[in-house]
Image (cartoon, rainbow, N blue to C red):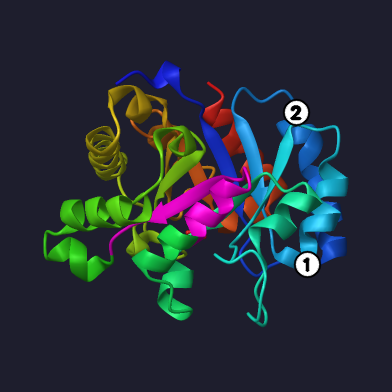
């Protein structure tokens, strides 16, 4: 597999943090620190912060994403936001299937697939999250589990649309815990996911797909992780809320 054939992407996932005014302030702080990066820089922020984020990032190399979207275009889904709504705002990316959505909001592999299709239909780029729990890792079913999550999520999605999919391997046990997967563990699972993508589509599609690692990635451990052949950047939670730390990770992925 050839790393030069795909983009490295460092994406922040702000989760349920920052108000609109805090969003403006943090992006203004980040802009000079990540300017000229040799990787893509994306910030996925809460729905109510999207407008502020889009305005603050204008004219910079920071692209903006949402943290979820619904699978219907419109309708009686109180509290949800659709892909056409995001598109009209100028949002470019959307995270789908984050483990916190799966764990706390009843997201399943099937709804992840539906949401992915809806986002792709609007031309949004999808950051699709997969990953095992600690129990599943200890049962030695990580490979089967992430393969199944990937296959179901990409079910019925064309090769052309798959070009707009980024996969984030996020072991659930590493999220927000300070426990990072070793670079070898991240590489192993990202390579497994790439092989699954090659099985579904073909080698060219797999080689072109950005596959990130996420889970307690920070300014200290990022170098080793992003240096791995199959790890094309990261999806960053906590460290994406600190301009300086986030910019160190962006610089690591730019090398
Ligand atoms: P942390 O970097 O805070 O562990 O979060 C990772 C994550 O869930 C990104 O989507």
In the rendered image, which quarter is residue 77 located in?
Answer: bottom right
Q: Nearer the viewer, residue 219 or 17?
A: 17
Q: Mark 2: give few (<14), some (14-19) or many (20+) Cα within 10 Å.
A: some
- Say the numbered circle drawn on residue 48: 1
Q: Nearer the viewer, residue 138 or 109?
A: 109
Q: Position of residue 191 (x, y in %)?
A: 26, 36
Q: Which residue is mark 2?
A: 35
Residue 165, which numbered label?
none
Label 1 environment density (alpha carbons within 10 Å; few <14, some 14–19, many ≥20):
few
Residue pictured at 35% horizontal, 65% vertical:
109
Does the stretch in magenta take in 127?
yes
Q: Is residue 76 above or below residue 57?
A: below
Q: Is residue 97 visible?
A: no
- Identify the secondary structure beneath mark 2: loop
With respect to residue 135, does 141 lie above or below? above
Tell me the mark number nearer the camera, choosing from 1 and 2: 1
Dividing the picture into quarters, in which one does residue 31 lie?
A: top right
The residue that appears at 73% across and 38% down in the rendered structure is 62
Residue 173: x, y in percent?
Answer: 33, 64
Left or right of residue 220, residue 56 in this image: right
Which residue: 65% across, 74% down? 80
Q: Residue at x 56, y 39 (%)?
A: 10
Taking 152 as reference, is 11 left or right? right
Image location of residue 57, percent across then percent down: 82, 42
Q: Nearer the viewer, residue 33 or 24?
A: 24
Magenta extent? 115-132
Q: Is residue 141 magenta?
A: no
Is label 2's Cβ within 8 Å of ligand 1? no
């Amino acid at each position: 597999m050839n790393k030069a054939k795909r983009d490295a992407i460092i994406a922040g996932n702000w989760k349920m943090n920052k108000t609109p005014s805090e969003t403006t302030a943090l992006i203004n702080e980040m802009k000079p620190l990540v300017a000229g990066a040799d990787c893509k820089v994306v910030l996925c922020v809460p729905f109510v912060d999207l407008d502020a984020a889009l305005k603050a990032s204008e004219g910079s190399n920071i692209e903006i994403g949402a943290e979820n979207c619904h699978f219907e275009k419109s309708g009686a889904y109180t509290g949800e936001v659709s892909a056409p709504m995001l598109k009209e705002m100028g949002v470019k990316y959307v995270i789908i299937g984050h483990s916190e959505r799966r764990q706390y909001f009843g997201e399943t592999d099937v709804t992840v697939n539906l949401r992915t299709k809806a986002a792709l239909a609007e031309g949004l780029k999808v950051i699709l999250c997969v990953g095992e729990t600690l129990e599943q890792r200890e049962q030695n079913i990580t490979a089967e589990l992430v393969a199944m999550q990937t296959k179901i999520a990409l079910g019925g999605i064309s090769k052309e649309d798959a070009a707009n999919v980024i996969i984030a391997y996020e072991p659930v046990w590493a999220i927000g815990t300070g426990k990072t997967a070793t670079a070898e563990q991240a590489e192993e699972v990202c390579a497994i996911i790439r092989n699954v993508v090659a099985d579904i589509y073909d080698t060219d599609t797999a080689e072109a797909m950005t596959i990130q690692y996420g889970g307690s990635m920070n300014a200290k451990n990022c170098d080793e992780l992003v240096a791995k052949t199959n790890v094309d950047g990261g999806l960053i939670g906590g460290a994406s809320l600190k301009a300086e730390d986030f910019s160190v990770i962006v610089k690591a992925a730019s090398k």
